[in-house]
Amino acid sequence: MLNIKCPYCGDRSQKEFAYGGDGTITRPKLNQEISDEEWDNFVYLRKSPRGKHIELWHHIAGCRQWFKVERDTTTHEIFRTFKPEE
Amino acid sequence: MSQNFRLNTGGLINRDKPIEFKFNGKKYIGYEGDTLASALLANGIHLIGRSFKYHRPRGFFGAGVDEPNAKMQVEINGCSEPNINATEIELVNGLSASSQNCWPSVNFDIGAINNFLNRFFPAGFYYKTFMWPKSFWYRVYEPFIRKAAGLGIASLEKDKERYEHKYEYCDLLVTGSGPAGLASAYAAAKNGAKVILAEDKPRYGGTLLTDDVTIDNLSGKDWSEKIISELKEMPNVIVKNRSQVFGYYDHNMMVMFERTGDHLEKKPKHTPRQRLWYIRAKEVLLSTGSIERPIVFGNNDTPGVFLSAAAKEYMKVYGVLIGKKPIIFTNNDSGYETAIEFKKNGVNPIVLDTREDQNSELINEAKDLDIKIKFSYAVIVAHGYKKVKSATIGKLNKEKIDFVNKEQIDCDSICVSGFWTPTVHLASQSGNKLKFNDSIDAFVPDKSKQNEHSLGAANGTFTLQDTLKNSFNTGSEVSKSITKKNEKIQIPNTNERKYSAHDKFWCSPLPKGKNYKRFVDFQNDVAVSDIEVALREGYRSIEHVKRYTTLGMATDQGRTSNLNGLQLVANVEKKIVPQVGHTTFRPPFTPVTIGTIVGREIGKEYMPTRKTPMHHWHEKNNAVWVDAGAWKRPRYYKRGNENLFEASKREAKNVRDHVGICDVTTLGKIDIKGPDAAEFLNRVYTNAWLKLPVGKARYGVMLREDGIVMDDGTTTRISENHYHMTTTTAQAANVLSHLEYYLQIVWPELNVNVVSTTEQWAGAAIAGPKSRDLLAKLFSKIDVSNEALPFMGYVEGDLFGVKARIFRISFSGELAYEINVESDFGLFMWEKIIEIGEEFNVQPYGTEALSTLRIEMGHVAGPELDGRTIPYDVSLEGLVSKKKDFIGKRSLAKEAFNQADRQKIVGLVPLDRKSSIPEGSHLVENKNAKLPNPKLGHVSSSCWSVENNNPFSLAILKDGKNMIGKKLFAVSPLKNTSIEVEVMSSHYVDHEGKRVRS
């Protein structure tokens, strides 16, 4: 069980969080002209990197804030956690 | 029977307190402080079970977690549990144990015929023999194997015991209270660190209890008692015995179980039997010690063969002799410690040392005590079936691969010592890649992957002086970086005997023409010959050899067999052990009861139960419950002998004819506030939201980014910047997370806040033609006419002094209202409605009637919004704005979503107007077509239409738009039905939606 430092609440057990997917994806802007391929990339295609990865996590059983986690997907080492605007 | 093998003095047992227990039905006496194993040995009982595969007689071999054989069925406090290690369970009054894996009895076991047929039971036997004929597997082979191979018997009764979970955080977790654990815990505690010291045995001290050493002129035992009592006095230290740390997980999450109840004769009422600890430790110090390795020889599994350190422990801790005529068979100095202990207790052992004649402190001491020593000697084979009676021993030749002479000598026990294996299980679980240490012929921890350090014997350090020095220093260093304190500690003086070098001898060669079974793994009955067969058959990877032969599997996880197994593979393969590598160490280190893992999350405590404020009213009125997530909802209210079908029909009919009331508290409710709330809703929902006036509700559909419908519900504008959103019961949590995601990550510029208010509001829907009359009586002060409160209108009212929100919205398709009051007044509201509604014939209705009402109206719900449908599919395309962008809109342009024959919701009625169509039925054109019969769609929801008095279903059908009027078959292979149906509009009742607006 991971130990995750919520940037708002501090160190908490993984039990309090929900994983929220790739944290490097940016949603296309509203009303933006966008090709089918670009849209499909945004909706469906995700890398599954081995090693360092930035992820979104949601403190669902806590402050209910979404934030980002830089984590190694093989060792589970967490290098940093930060607010989305950082 | 008296305790013939109990020494007159000595041991740490309480001789003033005899304890009566039973083994295989016979009564015996032991003492408080005994384990079941030591008490049986005191009574001269050695034959305790039969081996797994060959049903060979087996006896005790170790004295703790190292024990591979002594698994017993144990009954305490009326609970029967299999596979309990007799060397670990403490003796309590009334304990009753019996042997496993034998029938009819341990003395006469029919399965032992396997032993004489053993050439038919080679490695991989099961894989080879039971392959054919295939049909025999279920009927013949599997039942037979289960019966023959079963260890204990799991109780079929409900476990009456109580188990608990506990969470703890600390700076340092120290696993094991031997010298390394005590020293490191002490040093860290002195620096003010929060320390947990865990010891799996009842007594603290580890090897200090059995080794002849002094620390600062105290005996090992006295010194450990002194340290423990100091640690217990410190407020920053938790000291726990009977507590096994068995798993090492990510981020230093350690899992430990504590045996809190089994050793107590009378367990206090609220004491659990066992407790599981989740410990998050900043640093973990592994002081798990080491386990003695056996030396392999012929019939080395005969009862009476022990690890030499176990024999010593039985004497020193329990005052028990494992034999009166022992052979000590050793390749290192440890055997001499056992020999000396025997001698001190009046027993004359013979020491067989595989090394050549040499001197060391221990050997010289043994010589001085006139202990008979034979150098360059080994045990070839033990004789005796149910107990060792004699042994053939021999003098090894120079290469130690054959014997130059042989002789048979009488003995009643053989104590083996093949040197020591560090207990590296937890280190390995932490991700530490182990390295092979040549000087001790064993794996030791290498570089740490997590914050852990191995100390003492667990790290391959076998001298007390070095262990204490390293452990005090590591404890200080590690804690200093956490607490920033650095208390000086004087490392104590020690007095211990120096060992001379051990011999790498690990297995006695077979004399020519002899075919003795030489066991490597006792628990799984894996002999040298089995591993040789596996290698001959081409298995090379140690992981494959392990699985093919079952070497090192099962509950003891190869604690005594791993290294000898690796050594054997290395020898045959002409490699060295580090080239062979080792198998993976997995948690748990020792078996853990399922009860402990489950804890209190069992039965109705498995997950929280959510109850609405009206729950008890429903209960009193014969509600039959249905689970909706964690919620309990009334499915129907049973009257007399009604069944589900009858009751739901009555309730639904009453709504259509008069008025019904339904508890809708469980709907998700989200409060949305902020100046950008309208803009936010406009992005979230598919339809337009910017112009919704205050005091109005609107139905909305939200999509996922892939265009699939996520949820639907109504949202009401309470005031300028304040909205009240409702979601389906099932999606409430997901929708909130979804909204938070877009507000926090995607559009943080929007000034909006969302919060769940599901539990703050109690909700009641009143539906039916009489609902307005009822509402008028409930809220006499407000105008509830169609003009003042039209469909999709919202007002606030006063319900006999309680502030209420009134929404004119309808799920049933009837004229209907939803009333919300603060949860505390939910029951008040409900009872008022029932009371006042009596004159209008109000009846409560449950989820079944609710479904009936919405299905015949063609309103979609969960079964249609199943994560595969877009708005068009469920005929909600009218709600999709063409003008504005919203979440998921771009996906709706996808080709597949716009095909002419795209699936669409339709209604179905059976041609016979009688047969109910099972939900999940497949729609096909021809029920007799050749398989695979092309599937055109599926039935999503079914009901008995109370309006038309015949079955009606909703279905998602390919090209549904153009299928109206067609006849199809609804086929359910599951229910074995095939019903001819007519396709029609999904709106079966009130097609134009007049009633909701009436």
Image (spheres, grey):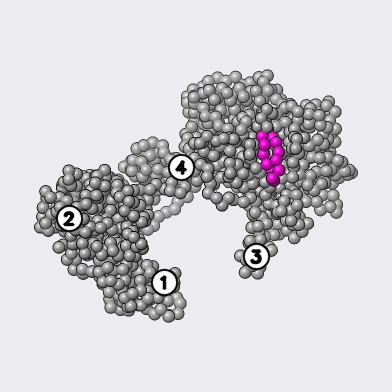
Q: In the figure, B126 relative to A79: above or below?
A: below
Q: Is residue B23 magenta?
A: yes
The spot of residue B32 in percent (x, y) is 65, 32
Look at the numbered disc 3 and give the secondary structure of its residue.
Answer: helix
Q: Which mark is residue B634?
A: none
> Residue at the location (62% across, 69% down)?
B135
The residue to which callout 4 is attached is A2
- Callouts 4 and 1 in the same chain: no
The amino acid at mark 1 is: Ser
Alpha-carbon distance for marks 4 and 3? 46 Å
The residue to which callout 3 is attached is B140
Residue range in magenta is B19-31
In the rendered image, is residue B756 in sight? no
Alpha-carbon distance for marks 4 and 2? 55 Å
Alpha-carbon distance for marks 3 and 2? 70 Å
Q: In the figure, B408 relative to B895: above or below?
A: above
| Residue B953 picture quarter | bottom left
Look at the numbered disc 1 and give the secondary structure of its residue.
Answer: strand
Q: Earlier in the sequence, mark 3 or mark 1?
A: 3
Q: Which mark is residue B972?
A: 1
The amino acid at mark 3 is: Val
> Residue at the location (23% across, 48% down)?
B829
Q: Chain of mark 3?
A: B
The residue to which callout 2 is attached is B774
The spot of residue B500 in percent (x, y) is 76, 31
Q: Earlier in the sequence, mark 1 or mark 2?
A: 2
